[in-house]
Image (spheres, rainbow, N blue to C red):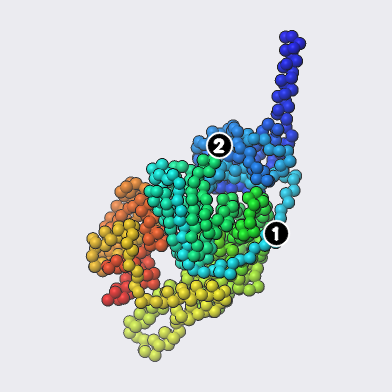
């Protein structure tokens, strides 16, 4: 080998060494949050920053046999919002489903475009799609990340709530999907599961996409909401239309491909346009994986970390995306709701975890009395005392209905009422309920959130009181051994519906909550109209065909599905009651189920043969079922809908609500139909 050749090789080696210079290695980095890895965990084991590439060694833990995949569109993002796309991957195949091994642990390595040496904190984002894996706030554990406080973020972004924030009016979502073709896109409708805290049930809103790609949906709302229409059938990677809307607004949206070929929403009007950056940033404080678990002593530390992580996340994302003050405050409200939801959801689940089992049933005996006492101790919830429970912005979060449900049903709060030998609906019970709730929330007055819990409690007990009072009067009239004086004394001892309602109302000081409670009472007590006519929409044609087969009969429709355990329990428990119902010429039971296969799966057919052999059973596909959910305004099953012989949808006060009080509710309706 001559001298010139040796020199050439040495120069090449020097050049190669220079190209691959390592200027930072982070051993065992820490992260703010792991997102969308349901019942699993994604970790970064090591980060190697070279001037030619940034390499991250990952570990993903999933239960054995679980399938997952990583997209080739994965990237890193630094504090300033700069992206560093994925170049290559070792240890798993991109865009392909991978099965978790026997150990549940999969190690893999990703190489990204190089990040500058100055980067201290960065994110891993698998793709710009809903549900993508994310590992946020990756940094060296020796590096102290500056976390802004809630107060600092709020004060740096002053925002005044509009005076007409609360009002009841119509929201219209409309627009067009450019280049839409039903066959190519894979769907003809999208669904929004919408719940108003002032209404009893969740609604299913169906957004039909016309052949030319246009769409429009109207619905009633009581306050501004953040939600989305989505589909699980998309073939083009576009599956969601997020929106933020206030009552009386029309939100016009154009869906078109961006420079990367991805479909995205362009907001042309309304509040969605005002907060477009917030909607598109997909602020994911509501999707953290299993944030709170273990004992109460551990949860306090976890809750504090969760709060700090969310503040850091909001600070970084608002900076990256140039949020307006309104967008920052919406983010802060979302964080408060998520902390509240996480804590109340934890205490609900933990309450069951510490119960002893008798076979497959829970008992009232506890395995850990100390944890049970902690669950009911207001001091266990000190992490919540930082939340502004009077802030109306909290209601914009899509999690707020579930959160209120967890709060007003909290065992730690409700049990305190029963320990005082009081009922939920008497004055002593309501006062004790507020006292326990206010202590848990760390409040010195009845906050907006506490009043919303009281409102929900009123709705939950109202129908029970109404039905119980009517049944007591009816039974009393048939009691032969009581004198008229004794009967009158018994009637006087009963709480009337009006008395119960007035007790709840006396504790509602918020003007809008009070107004909605008065409207709810008037609606429930007004029985002038049995129901509303079945509308002339395609989904109603199925009901008309069924009614034609059973003229002059009331239809009680049981909406159910094979995957719904509660549906099947109700069907199985009512089997011995249904032969007597079948003898009645006034009513016909109809069972409508959702099935993916035409005519139903084998499991469906076998189940029907065993439990519903003598009943009118119908199965429809998912799209038809969603339109029926939209028609009858329900979002959960089992759901029971009553139709009169003249095709009116019976109002809830007179409807048949299943099988527990079937005879009473049927006779009550027949009496009104005379």
Residue extending farthest top: 2
Question: Sequence order check: which comes first, mark 2 or mark 1?
Answer: 2
The spot of residue 336 in percent (x, y) is 62, 60
Image point (62%, 45%), residue name:
135
Q: Which quarter of the picture shows residue 646? A: bottom left
Instruction: Please give the residue where the numbered disc 1 appears in the rendered image.
Output: 156
- What is the distance, in whole Å, between disc 2 and disc 1 at their CAs? 38 Å
Query: Is any part of residue 515 visible from this angle?
Result: yes
Q: Position of residue 157 (x, y in %)?
A: 67, 59
Q: Secondary structure at mark 1?
A: loop
- Residue, x 49% and y 74% (percent of image)? 517
In the image: residue 16, left or right of residue 100: right
Above-or-below relation of 198 to 522: above
Residue with the mark numbered 2 = 72
How dense is the environment of label 2, judged by Cα within 10 Å: few (below 14), some, or many (20 and up)?
some
Q: Helix, strand or loop at disc 2?
A: loop
Camera-near label (2 vs 1) is 1
Residue 650 found in image quarter: bottom left
Q: For this rendering, which residue is in front, 321 or 201?
A: 321
Above or below residue 208? Residue 434 is: below
User: Residue shown at 58%/63% (left/top)?
Assistant: 394
């Amino acid at each position: 080998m001559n001298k010139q050749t040796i020199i050439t090789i040495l120069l090449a080696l020097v050049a190669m060494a220079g190209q691959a210079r390592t200027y930072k290695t982070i051993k065992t980095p820490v992260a703010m949050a792991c997102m969308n890895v349901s019942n699993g965990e994604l970790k970064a084991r090591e980060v190697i920053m070279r001037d030619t590439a940034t390499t991250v060694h990952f570990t993903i833990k999933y239960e054995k046999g679980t399938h997952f995949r990583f997209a080739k569109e994965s990237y890193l993002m630094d504090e300033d919002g700069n992206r560093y796309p994925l170049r290559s991957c070792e240890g798993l195949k991109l865009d392909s489903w991978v099965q978790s091994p026997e150990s549940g642990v999969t190690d893999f390595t990703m190489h990204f475009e190089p990040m500058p040496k100055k980067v201290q904190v960065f994110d891993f984002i698998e793709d710009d799609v809903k549900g993508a894996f994310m590992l946020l706030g990756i940094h060296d554990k020796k590096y102290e990340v500056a976390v802004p406080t809630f107060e600092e973020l709020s004060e740096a972004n002053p925002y005044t709530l509009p005076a007409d924030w609360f009002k009841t009016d119509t929201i219209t979502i409309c627009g067009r999907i450019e280049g839409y073709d039903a066959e190519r896109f894979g769907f003809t409708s999208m669904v929004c599961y919408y719940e108003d805290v002032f209404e009893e049930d969740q609604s299913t809103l169906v957004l039909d996409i016309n052949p030319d790609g246009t769409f429009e949906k109207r619905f009633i709302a009581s306050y501004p909401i953040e939600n989305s229409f989505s589909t699980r059938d998309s073939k083009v990677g576009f599956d969601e239309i997020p929106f933020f809307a206030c009552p009386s607004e029309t939100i016009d949206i154009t869906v078109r491909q961006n420079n990367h070929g991805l479909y995205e929403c362009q907001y042309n009007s309304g509040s969605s346009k005002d907060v477009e950056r917030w909607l598109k940033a997909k602020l994911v404080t509501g999707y953290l994986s299993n944030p709170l678990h273990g004992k109460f002593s551990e949860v306090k530390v976890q809750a504090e970390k969760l709060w700090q992580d969310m503040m850091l996340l909001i600070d970084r994302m608002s900076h990256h995306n140039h949020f307006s003050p309104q967008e920052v405050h919406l983010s802060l409200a979302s964080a408060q709701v998520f902390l509240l939801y996480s804590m109340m959801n934890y205490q609900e689940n933990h309450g069951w975890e510490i119960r002893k089992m008798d076979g497959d049933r829970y008992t009232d005996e506890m395995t850990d009395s100390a944890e049970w006492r902690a669950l009911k101790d207001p001091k266990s919830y000190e992490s919540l005392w930082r939340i502004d429970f009077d802030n109306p912005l909290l209601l914009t979060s899509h999690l707020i209905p579930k959160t209120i449900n967890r709060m007003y049903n909290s065992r730690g709060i409700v049990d305190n009422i029963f320990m005082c030998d009081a009922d939920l609906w008497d004055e002593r019970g309501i006062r004790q309920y507020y006292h326990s709730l206010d202590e848990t929330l760390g409040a010195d007055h009845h906050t907006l959130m506490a009043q919303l819990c009281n409102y929900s409690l009123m709705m939950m007990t109202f129908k029970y009181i109404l039905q119980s009072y009517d049944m007591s009067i009816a039974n009393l009239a048939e009691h032969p051994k009581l004198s008229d004086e004794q009967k009158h004394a018994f009637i006087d001892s009963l709480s009337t519906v009006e008395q119960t309602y007035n007790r709840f109302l006396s504790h509602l000081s918020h003007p809008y909550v009070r107004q909605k409670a008065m409207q709810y009472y008037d609606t429930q007590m007004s029985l002038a109209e049995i129901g509303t006519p079945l509308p002339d929409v395609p989904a109603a044609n199925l009901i008309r065909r069924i009614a034609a087969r059973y003229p002059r009969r009331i239809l009680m429709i049981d909406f159910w599905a094979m995957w719904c355990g509660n549906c099947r329990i109700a069907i199985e428990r009512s089997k011995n009651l249904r032969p007597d119902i079948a003898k009645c010429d006034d009513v016909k039971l109809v069972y409508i189920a959702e099935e993916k296969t035409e005519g139903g799966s084998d499991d469906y057919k076998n189940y029907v043969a065993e439990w519903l052999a003598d009943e009118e059973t119908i199965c429809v596909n998912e799209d038809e079922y969603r339109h029926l959910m939209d028609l009858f305004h329900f979002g959960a099953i089992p759901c029971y809908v009553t139709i009169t012989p003249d095709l009116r949808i019976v109002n809830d006060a007179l409807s048949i609500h299943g099988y527990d009080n079937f005879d009473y509710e049927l006779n009550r309706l027949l009496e009104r139909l005379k």
